[in-house]
Each structure stands twice: as structure tokens, then as C-alpha cells.
Image (spheres, helix red, strand yellow):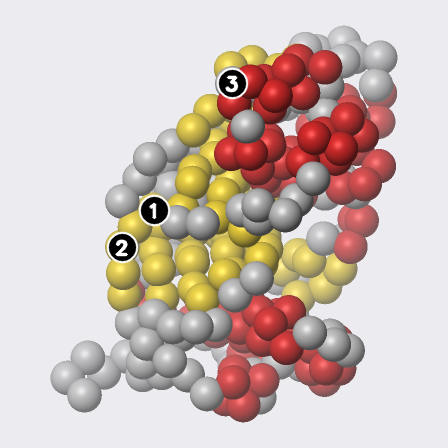
Amino acid sequence: MKTVALFCGDIELPIIETRYISDIPSSGTPILILASTQSIGVDESILYAKLTTQEAARAMAYRRPVQRSAYILNHALLRMVLSRKLNISEKEVPIIQGSNGKPILDYPLPIHFNISDSDHQILIAFSTQSPIGADIEKISPETDFHAISGKFFSMAECKSIIEKGQDQFYRYWTRKEAALKACGLGITEYLHRIQVLNGENPISPNDKGLHKAFNTDYEVLSMKYKSFFMAFSSPKPVKSPEIYFLHNLILTDNKDI
């Protein structure tokens, strides 16, 4: 059986600030888009109107306003970016549920994406080369990360977390989620079955379900961003991503306005 592994590490990349979706490239390197409900600068009703009926109902099911607003922003921006790529309206973008509930594009173009949100921050990852997974988590001093680590992390990971503390926990957690989301595996079932230490982390050939899902080497890269950790994952080789932060969004391509 072919040997496959997760190759993990940190990245430090510049974040390009923009107010225009048109500034975001349509192809080439992987693209990570950051945005915040606190600084997007667009009335939430305008974003809400871009959702499908099903998405709108799901948004309203959130009881906490911060979660509802993040959901609306994430899904509206996703549709806005994809509508530009496909030259169709936002509501026409054919997003369906893939394996384990992972959203995928039902369209004859190689556009892969993944979304995540935490608190007021959202993250959208795009790739035209291969499947991609992404995760973002707000660093919370109230999290009992030692207790959680014992359930979902290997002994080597737990040892590293004890030595290096809270940041290491969030570094590993976002790496795990990004890797599993990249290949469409369920988080709760597989979180404890992968290891994401710096360097090479072989997938056990005895874990046939996991081995079959990954089927090739994956790169998993993490980065601290303000009070958040984020990570993305794709099959190797991975080009260095470009990261964009959308704020005070202008809903037109006319930059002379």
C-alpha cells in the first residue's frame, strides 16, 4: 500500500487589504479570503438577500447574533466571489452538499473551496488546482485545551501542547480540521486519528478508511492572525497562497466611484 502523510508547518505571509472582490485573482495560486462582520461595511440585509432560501432559513436558525451574522457574511461572500468566476448571479451558483456535508460546486469547472468562521471572523479558501480545506478559530483563554487535547490529540501532540501552551493547541486544532475538510472527512470521527506535528506525519496504512480518503500526501499550513489561528490544506505540491482581507466592501467594480 502506498505511503501517504500530512506535511505540516507554519507560514507567515502578507495580507493584502482590498475593498473590491474584483481584486481577487480568479485562478493560479490558492486564495484565502478573510473578512469580519465588524468591518465589512455592508448592511447585513444586502448580504442576506444574496442567500438561497435554504441558506436564509439556516441563518435565521442561529440564536446567537454573532453566529448568524458570520454565517450570512461567509455564504454571501462565497456566492459573490463564485458568481464572478462563473458569470452568473449569486443565487444561481450551484452549491451542493458533497461527502460528509462538505459544500462543493456542481459545475464543470475545477473550482474547489472551503469555508470557516469563528466569532466575527470568516475565512474562505479557493483553489483551481485541487481540493482544499480551511479552518479558523478564535483564541479563547477560557478554553480548557488540556482536557480537549486528551480526547483528540496524540501523546506527542499533547506533550507539545503542555510544553508550549495555548497557541500550540489552536495551531494543531486548525491543522486537523483543515486537513480533514480538504478530503471531505467528518471532523468528530477522525480528529483523533491524524497527527499534525511539524514535519511529516504518516497516515497509518492500517487505518484503511483514512488512508483511502487522503490517498496522497497533503500539505497542512497554519498561521496566527491577530487573536485567531487559521490553517489550510491541499494535496502536495501546494503553491504559496495569497491572502486577502476584505473590508468596507464596495459592491461595484467601478473604482472611480
Q: Disc 1 marks which amino acid?
A: Glu
Residue 11 visible, this angle: yes
Does label 1 or label 3 sit earlier along the sequence? 3
Q: Disc 2 marks which amino acid?
A: Ile
- Occupied quadrant, residue 94: bottom right
Q: How far across and down, in percent of the image, does residue 159 sit?
A: 64, 15
Q: Nearer the viewer, residue 28 or 12?
A: 12
- Is residue 19 shown left or right of residue 58? left
Q: How far across and down, in percent of the image, does residue 22 sit?
A: 31, 69
Q: Decide: marks 3, 2 in contact (CB < 8 A)? A: no
At mark 2, the secondary structure is strand
The structure residue drawn at horizontal position 31% and vertical position 39%, both measured from the top left corner, is: 13
Count of all numbered marks drawn on residues in the image: 3
Seen in the picture, residue 116 relative to 41 is either above or below; the reply is above
- Is residue 64 shown left or right of residue 127? right
Q: How far across and down, in percent of the image, does residue 63 sit?
A: 74, 76
Badge 1 crowding class, 10 Å Cα cut-off, few under 14, some 14 to 19, many 20 or more, is some
The structure residue drawn at horizontal position 36% and vertical position 66%, both measured from the top left corner, is: 246
Query: Spatial distance from mark 3 to mark 2, Cα to Cα?
Result: 27 Å
Badge 2 crowding class, 10 Å Cα cut-off, few under 14, some 14 to 19, many 20 or more, is some
> Which residue is under mark 2?
16
> Which residue is under mark 1?
242
The structure residue drawn at horizontal position 63% and vertical position 77%, both measured from the top left corner, is: 65
Query: Spatial distance from mark 2 to mark 1, Cα to Cα?
Result: 8 Å
Q: Decide: marks 2, 1 in contact (CB < 8 A)? A: yes
At mark 3, the secondary structure is loop
> Which residue is under mark 3?
198
- The image quadrant where one finds the N terminus is top right
Q: Nearer the viewer, mark 1 or mark 3?
A: 3
Seen in the picture, residue 65 relative to 227 is either above or below; the reply is below
Seen in the picture, residue 78 relative to 118 is either above or below; the reply is below
